[in-house]
Amino acid sequence: MKKIERRSSLKKLFASLAGFAGISTVASAKSETSAPEKQAFNVVEDQDIPLFSGSTKLGNMVFIAGKGAHFDGDIKAHTDHVLKELEKELVKAGSSMEKVLKVNVYLHDLNDYKGMNEVFRGRFGPKPPVRTTVATYGGVPGDSLVEMDCIAYI
């Protein structure tokens, strides 16, 4: 009896999570549904071969690729620029900073953590997303002092 109740509870949990992510669920093993179509935007090519997308949508989720700041400046200027670039991509995708669920922050130097936080604070509304911050070995590509990517909903 407990095994059936637990299985039923797990099915309900997974169905609600899938619904939140905009993914259709299978009602029974016999019925088939197709997965939602992935939409890629701002595809970057290398020698005419797609390398990565600037953003991707799947269901009601949007994934924004890493954004950096490729100009001379300090960590505060770079962080402000990167956050503005993330916001532009989110708005284009039909989302906003307030709908960001997860942010990854990659710092060129961990000593910039405090300065990055000063600019980061409050940019995602009253309920900030979860965040991971790491210092990268060898620096962030393109000489940026910071790079960020994020996951949001629409």
Image (cartoon, grey):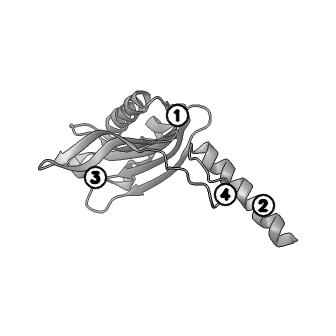
Label 2: how many Cα within 10 Å (few below 14, some 14–19, many 20+): few
Query: Mark 1 falls on what kind of element?
Result: loop
Q: Which residue is mark 1?
A: 154
Query: Mark 3 falls on what kind of element?
Result: loop
Give the mark, 3 or 2, whose residue is nearer the N terminus.
2
Q: Which residue is mark 2?
A: 8
Label 2 to label 1, Cα distance in Å?
29 Å
Give the mark, 2 or 1, whose residue is nearer the N terminus.
2
Q: Nearer the viewer, mark 4 or mark 3?
A: 4
Tell which of 62 and 108 is nearer to you.
62
| Outermost residue toward the right in this view | 1
| Outermost residue toward the left in this view | 47
Label 1: how many Cα within 10 Å (few below 14, some 14–19, many 20+): some
Q: Which residue is mark 4?
A: 28
Query: Mark 4 falls on what kind of element?
Result: loop
Q: Which residue is mark 3?
A: 140
Residue 21 in sight here: yes
Give the mark, 1 or 3, whose residue is nearer the N terminus.
3
Query: Mark 2 falls on what kind of element?
Result: helix
Amino acid type at image mark 4:
Ser
Q: Please, is residue 97 above or below residue 116 in the view?
A: above
Q: Are marks 1 and 4 in contact (CB under 8 Å)?
A: no
